[in-house]
Image (cartoon, rainbow, N blue to C red):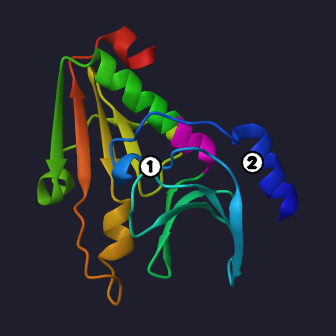
Amino acid sequence: MIDRMAAFDRSWGGLVLPPANDYEGGPKPFFPDVPEQDEEGWWFMAGDQRTSVPFAFYLGPDDEFCLLGDGRSVRLHASVEGWVESQALAHHARLWARRVSKLHGADADGLDLAGFEPVPEVRGLADTWWRGADSLVEVHRGEHELFAAPGASPYDLSRTAFVYEGLDEWGLTG
């Protein structure tokens, strides 16, 4: 466990990303803290939240980037690298898109992604990215999965999607 935390700190310790589109901005600085163990293995905190939220950002037993809250966990990305790639892609897409739309709940769930392909670099689990001909779609389901489960918190936070349109080939590939 200590080796995992030290490796995380060497790679990511002190990194401050711009605020994320969702999760009240995400973690502010990355630093390992508060190791915990459960039946799945060891978890540790990835850094402090930017705001007061009913969850924390953790790295899971297999180094997945997760939310923990109400005694439950949701894996957002298969790695911290996936989270960082997702944030970099969001920044890039916001900068170059001609139009950005934000969808919630049923509208986000009903988004037609036919003709889109997943963006593998984000290593998405509950949160994913999709690439189309001239657009990108960012989908967040983590908070909803964390709090909408039976017996979980009374919060029913919405699924959210951001649709970035009008990206030419350079806007999609950097």
Query: Could you say where residue 13 lies in the image, as x and y percent from the top left?
Result: 70, 42
The extreme right residue here reads 3
Quadrant of the snapshot with the N terminus: bottom right
| Residue occupying the point 46% across, 36% down | 87
Return the residue at label 2: 8
Left or right position of 51 against 80: left
Magenta residue span: 79-84
Q: From this view, report whether residue 57 is shown above or below residue 30.
A: below
**Drawn side of residue 106 relative to residue 22, left or right:** left
Q: Which residue type does callout 2 highlight?
A: Phe
Q: Secondary structure at mark 1?
A: loop
Residue 6 appears at what percent x and percent y? Answer: 83, 51
Residue type at the position of mark 1: Gly
The spot of residue 90 in percent (x, y) is 38, 31
Which residue corresponds to mark 1?
A: 26
- The magenta stretch spans residue 163: no
